[in-house]
Amino acid sequence: MIMDDVVYDAYREAGALAQKILHRAAGMVKEEASLLEMVEATEAMVTEEGAFLAFPLNVSFNEAAAHDTAMPGDERMFARGDLVKVDLGVHIDGYIADTALTVNLGDHGPLVEASRAALEAAIAAVRPGVTTGELGTAIQAAIEEHGYRPVANLTGHGLDRYDLHGKPTIPNVAMSGGAVLEEGMVFAIEPFATTGSGKVGEATRVEIYKQIAARPARLPSAKRVLETARPRRGLPFSRRWVPGDKVEIGLATLVRTGILHPFPMLHDVPGSFVSQAEHTLIVTEDGCEVTTR
């Protein structure tokens, strides 16, 4: 696959910006700091830099792995002992960088290192001709070497223009076969290591949605939701971003009628801890370029 210079530069610019802002965000994860203030400040940094959010900033605590973000009026604070995943997506003209790290406010250093080591092992294996199954094998081996389980039902994913979850899928467990990597592919690798079961389930709370169908809505609250969703061009948005009242009614109506897709928070078993590490990369002739390094 041939990537022209304009596209390549957009991916690289998004990656450099995401990396810079992610580390600023991680610096705000401190005991007794406000989750809502941290999330809003981080999201504002993206727009202040002239870029756009590819999805609401994900901040997931402890056994939660993904799809959590601040609620409207959220009063949660970071606390001693927390293990906090910070997952940021930035796009330039639809070309996405997706990157994440884990902030350790407790004694979870080896678990954090497990996901980091798995990410580096997978990146080291990337080159044309390698299969995604081989990347999953490298990820699982690195996590298990550290004494933890990979989360089997979460994966890395291709990144296309305005498409956050394209092909190829990058497994976090060993498998044979899979897609064959080609020069010019762009994708995110995101290992999750856990002290729990190795599988995540859906919580009842939903903060993140995306539009999947273009149909009119009659309810005023649903119309207001769509005013937030439409400019996103299919990229996810937060309930927190929708102004006005009766937002819950509008969201529920649009989900029920198949116009919106919800992303419930994903978590392992209560009492467990999950760590995450993620980079976006472009496959090159003899390896890869990590745009979010």
Image (spheres, rainbow, N blue to C red):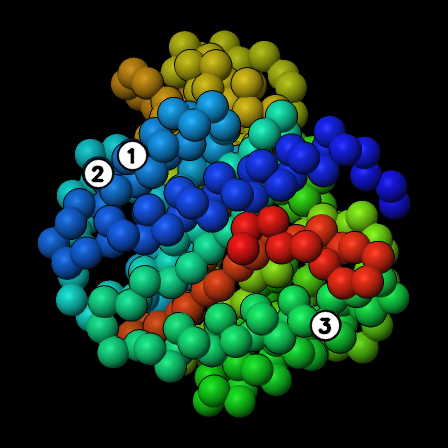
Mark 3 to mark 2 CA distance (whole Å): 38 Å
Q: Amino acid at mark 2?
A: Glu
Q: Residues within 10 Å of mark 2 (few under 14, many from 20)?
A: some
* Above or below 260: residue 57: below
* Above or below 226: residue 150: below
Badge nearest the viewer, 3 or 2: 3
Residue 114 is left or right of residue 165, and the answer is left
Q: Which residue is mark 3?
A: 125
Label placed on residue 269: none
What residue sits 77% from the left and 33% below the top? 5
What residue sits 50% from the left and 27% below the top? 51
- Quarter of image, res 242: top left
Question: Is label 3 in contact with label 1 (beta carbons under 8 Å)?
Answer: no
Mark 3 to mark 1 CA distance (whole Å): 36 Å
Residue 162 is left or right of residue 45, and the answer is right
Question: Of the residues under marks 3 and 2, which one precedes in the sequence?
Answer: 2
Mark 2 to mark 1 CA distance (whole Å): 5 Å
Q: Which residue is mark 1?
A: 40
Question: Of the residues under marks 3 and 1, which one precedes in the sequence?
Answer: 1
Q: Amino acid at mark 3?
A: Ala
Question: Is label 2 in contact with label 1 (beta carbons under 8 Å)?
Answer: yes
- Quarter of image, res 182: bottom right
Provide the secondary structure element on which disc 1 rests: helix
Q: Kindly tell me whether residue 261 is visible in this rendering.
A: no
What residue sits 29% from the left and 68% below the top? 104
Badge nearest the viewer, 3 or 1: 3
- Residue 62 in percent (x, y) is at 31, 66
Q: Kindly tell me whether residue 131 is visible in this rendering.
A: yes
Residue 249 is left or right of residue 122, and the answer is left
Q: Which residue is mark 2?
A: 37
